[in-house]
Image: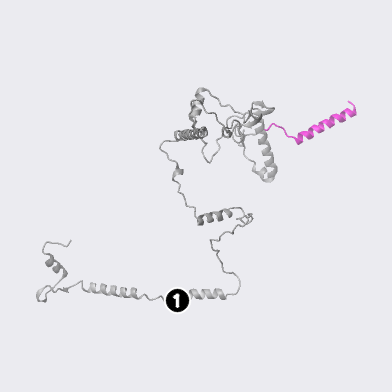
Amino acid sequence: MTSSEVDTVSQIVANQRENESKFKSIDVFKEVDPVIDLGNLLLLDLQPVNSDELKSKSEQFLIELARDNAQLLFNQIWKLPIERVDNIVLAKLPEPSTLLPREKPIPKPKPPTKWEIYAKKKGIEKKKRSRMLWDEESKTWKPRHGYKRTKDDTKEWCIEVPQNADPNEDQFEKKEIAKKERVAKNEIKRLGNIARNTKKGTVSSLQFKPTLEKDKTRVSKEIDVAKLSTASMGKFQPKLPHEKENKKTGQKRKFESVSGNGINEKQRALDILKKINKPGKLDLTKAVNKKVYENKESSSKLSSGKVKNKRFRKGKQATLDKMKSRTLGKGKKRR
């Protein structure tokens, strides 16, 4: 080999080594196999983390770890069966194996209507119809339904009277009545589907919600709350022309200043002390009632012994027990 050929080979080898150092291999080896869920495009790395390497060079360690795990996930994706749709390569993902937490349960499929059950039984398939139709009279394309639709019978100024119909009958009014009947019939069918699909014995909670009267005070309060329900508390909210300011329903609390002369603070302390040392007000009625009650208590204690009864002759004295026995009789007790 000549010197030029040797230089070319060495240059090719150097370029290859440089590319290898720049682009890492797609083969990744791990001591503990990760758990891969292709249905959720999820990879769980079960290999223990080297804490020393993480502390010494955390940024580089996390980048390499993320790259290796992403490479393992892509390696499994490339093994999936692919299909081509409109010159786009698609990979069909399998069913997910990891159950992800949900705030609410999976919504149940909507129950079929009476027509859907009948169409499925008879094999009737729904075909998508075009929105525009060709109108032979105007020689233009018109929408099938809605404004300026084809065969708009409401725009007809003359209607042919059928042979078996009453010549004095208003055909325009008859057409309007027939349309109202069709609308009412469809509404009855819709309500019937709802009643058939709902559970028996359950009542909608929407029927028993309280209805609040929208008086002027409540409406103005709701408007004030809506104005303050922005990120800036309504400070940078653009105002409408002739819009009134919000009513300040609350009272702002005022705090005493923490700096300045101590005269006000001294006066507040003296007022509190004066209020504490001030004698209480005399309630004359309460004092009289208390004195009367005390007198009754003392007299009842003194009369608990022997008392003089005027019903007994010759001024005989008797105890309370003897008085009760004589007034009630022997063998009788007061109930």
Label 1 crowd bin: few (<14), some (14–19), many (20+), radius 10 Å: few
Picture residue at 46% right of the left edge, 43% below the top = 206
Residue projecting furthest to the left: 314
- Residue range (magenta): 1-28
Disc 1, SS: helix
Picture residue at 11% right of the left edge, 73% below the top = 312
Q: Position of residue 151 (x, y in %)?
A: 59, 30
List the residue tagged with mark 1: 277
Picture residue at 76% right of the left edge, 36% below the top = 22
| Residue 29 appears in view | no
| Image quadrant occupied by the N terminus | top right
Q: How many marks?
A: 1
32 versus 284 height, above or below: above
Q: How is the image coloured?
A: one colour
| Magenta span: chief secondary structure | helix
Whether the magenta-drawn stretch holds residue 8 is answered as yes
> Which quadrant would residue 294 be assigned to in this image?
bottom left
Callout 1, which amino acid? Asn
- The residue closer to the viewer here, 44 or 61, is 44
Whether the magenta-drawn stretch holds residue 157 is answered as no
Q: Position of residue 39 (x, y in %)?
A: 60, 32
Residue projecting furthest to the front: 168
Q: Position of residue 228 (x, y in %)?
A: 58, 55
Indicate left or right for 137 with 285 as reference.
right
Q: Position of residue 251 (x, y in %)?
A: 54, 63
| Residue 195 appears in view | yes
